[in-house]
Amino acid sequence: MEAKFKYFNMKKIINFLFVTIMSMTLAFVACNKDDTSTSSNSNSNNNGIFVIEAKDVLIHGNADNLASVGIIYDEKDPVIIATAEYKNRGFKLTLPKTIEDKYLFPISSWFETGIVSDEKTKIQQIIPGKILGFDNQGYDFEKNYVGYFDFRNSGCGLAAFLYVDRNCTVTGEGDMDGIPTKYDCKFNKGWNTLYIISCWDDDGYVTTKKPSDWNWNWIFHSEDYYK
């Protein structure tokens, strides 16, 4: 089966933010005009067990058939690595403690600039297009896929989840497709949350520290929302 989901590196993530920034900002204005509720995210990494918990998910499009959530890796041959029921506008996913080496790739393929403390580090990524919504009939990508989730600030920031096979840091400054970018990332072996900030004409900022003064939201985008 041919996969629908494409590979993202840091450059493509930042481009994704710029492409969607206007539509997402307008969508949030519309959502927040009469609704003061916010989405929340709780990630815990205890003894190598990493849990993604989403609450008060905002809906862009149609979620009538949304019944479950699945996470994939390996875009050429998608493999479901975690599943959860979607209910009460939320879900709770437990990620695998370890990942086989065949599913990992060099950290340099994601961080093309910046100072990496250990170039031998290998990673896996969970980004938009990998946290998927399905109906209640199964996890077939052709038959049951109904949309995808992401975790973001209103237009300027996007979160990703990275697995690293060892402790490492990414620091310094770089250039992402013409966008000056600063890095402040401290990865612990296992799963980590990464925040990618790119607002209008400002420089990019990539960090493992959640910006405390921003409102972050889980959003479900139905398959037909942008058509």
Image (cartoon, rainbow, N blue to C red):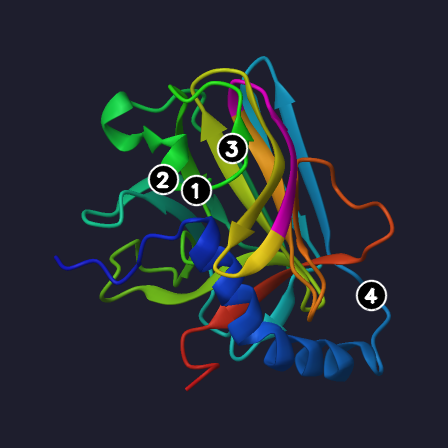
Rendered position, 13 above or below 17: above
Return the residue at label 3.
Answer: 94
Q: Are marks 4 and 1 in contact (CB under 8 Å)?
A: no
Q: Is residue 16 found left or right of 223 in the rendered image?
A: right
Please give the range of residues in magenta.
181-190
Return the residue at label 4.
Answer: 37
Question: In the image, which is nearer the foreground, mark 2 or mark 1?
Answer: 1
* Residue 12 horizontal/vertical position (percent): 43, 58
- Seen as rendered, the residue at the extreme top is 47
Viewer-proximal residue among 108 and 147: 108
| Distance of label 4 from label 2 (alpha carbons) | 38 Å
| Element carrying mark 3 | strand
Return the residue at label 2.
Answer: 109
Return the residue at label 1.
Answer: 112
Return the disc, 4 or 2, that comes first in the chain's sequence: 4
In reply to whether residue 153 is colored magenta, the answer given is no
Amino acid tagged 2: Ser
Q: Quadrant of the N terminus?
A: bottom left
| Element carrying mark 4 | loop
| Distance of label 4 from label 1 (alpha carbons) | 37 Å
* Residue 16 horizontal/vertical position (percent): 49, 65
